[in-house]
Image (spheres, helix red, strand yellow):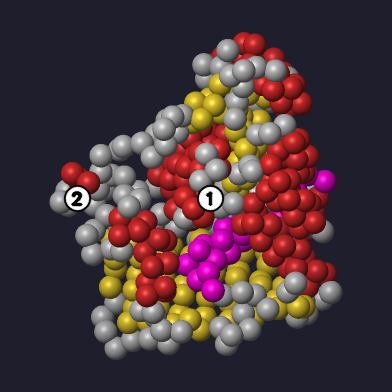
Amino acid sequence: MAWARDEMIDGRRKTGRALRWGMIGGGQGSQIGYIHRSAALRDRYFDLQAGALDLNPERGRSFAAELGIAHDRAYADYGALLAGEAARPDGVEVVTIATPNNTHYPITRAALQAGLHVICEKPLTFTSAEAEELRNIAQLRGLIVGVTYGYGFYQTIEQARALVASGALGKVRLVNMTFAHGFHSAPVEDLNPAIRWRVDPTFAGPSYVLGDLATHPLYLSQVICPDLKIRRLLCARQSFVASRAPLEDNAMVLMDYGCGAFGTLWTSAVNAGAMHSQKLRIVGEQASLEWWDEFPNQLRLEVQGQPAQVLERGMPYLHPEALADDRIGGGHPEGLFESWATMYERIACAIEAAQQGDHARLAGIRYPDVSAGIAGVRWVEHCVRSADKGGVWIDYR
């Protein structure tokens, strides 16, 4: 086992205190709710004090009690939570929104208008116009909006970002992205209400896999290659399970970055037999990088004419910015909760910096902010527009 760096992992806090935190949605039986709580509470950057956890108020209050939330701070709905907490001198400062897609915009808007920082599930909104409005409100009020692209905080992603920035790959030529699982290759939503809303345009919005899956590797590509900007794209999408139409369960996207680089993305819920299959490959003039989320501890570096290398997380040869996120030392597996916990930690730091008016510190914190949310929404809009025109190139604007 590689414990050479254990003395550097001391677990010291990066903020002065825990933020008073509330949850909207994410109640009993919610997988994503459990992930949010596990990540936010892991390092005590957040203190869960209030919640509107369920559409069924009594069920929500019962579960809130199990989580240690006081009865008078377990609310029937988000409106009651915002009003009740605003009336308290010790009211929550930040809320997480873990509800179906169609509620993200109105709840986020109401929370920002109530003066609260927000951590929202993606997609942030259904339209970029709505997302831009939220950004304007947040900026006017000095508030943070975090969007939960939780895969972007593995050490190996930070290492890939550093390698591209260093020029180790040479000029980037190709970005190949995949997020294509097989768990919905049959109409599983017929028997599972938790999946059913994801394929209903009323709740899910204008897309299924493009918004639900594809925006994750898209965000990773933007983290690793921040200088690549989409100039135009072409999208074709299909509904192999016919009852899901007009929403797609499979899609292909081509992206022209306008600088000689080209991107491809395949996203699917009908890739029969595949477990998760979120992969990202960056091809440069001199070398390539490849990351697969089922093996998140490894980053594959392939330099032309040399044997392929597998870079392991937690090792002293990694870039300092990658090692700065190390939690458990080399040789131990790092998983989704670690990445989410790092995301929550950074959002907490951003909130504290905003509260203190420390703009220099805030500018140095990378987290999935409201602009990341807007970028995801905007990308989906363009994909849908291209696909609905028969799969044609459209300018990115």
**Picture residue at 70% right of the left edge, 18% below the top:** 87
Magenta-highlighted residues: 202-227
Quadrant for residue 302, please give it. Answer: bottom left
Give the position of the C terminus as an image quadrant.
bottom right
- Most foreground residue, 370 or 53: 370
- Most foreground residue, 240 or 179: 179
Residue positioned most to the top: 71
Query: As shown in the figure, which amino acid type bears the numbered disc 1?
Result: His
Q: Secondary structure at mark 1?
A: helix
**Picture residue at 18% right of the left edge, 44% below the top:** 7
- Residue 272, image x, y percentages: 57, 60
In magenta segment, residue 197: no
As drawn, 198 above or below 98: below
**Picture residue at 31% right of the left edge, 37% below the top:** 12
Q: Which mark is residue 288?
A: none
Q: Nearer the N terminus, badge 1 or badge 2?
A: 2
Q: Which mark is residue 359?
A: 1
Residue denoted by label 2: 5
Few, some or many C-alpha atoms within 10 Å of disc 2 (few <14, some 14-19, many ≥20)? some
- Residue 98, image x, y percentages: 64, 37
Number of disc labels = 2
Q: Is residue 297 visible?
A: no
Q: CA distance from mark 1 to mark 2?
A: 32 Å
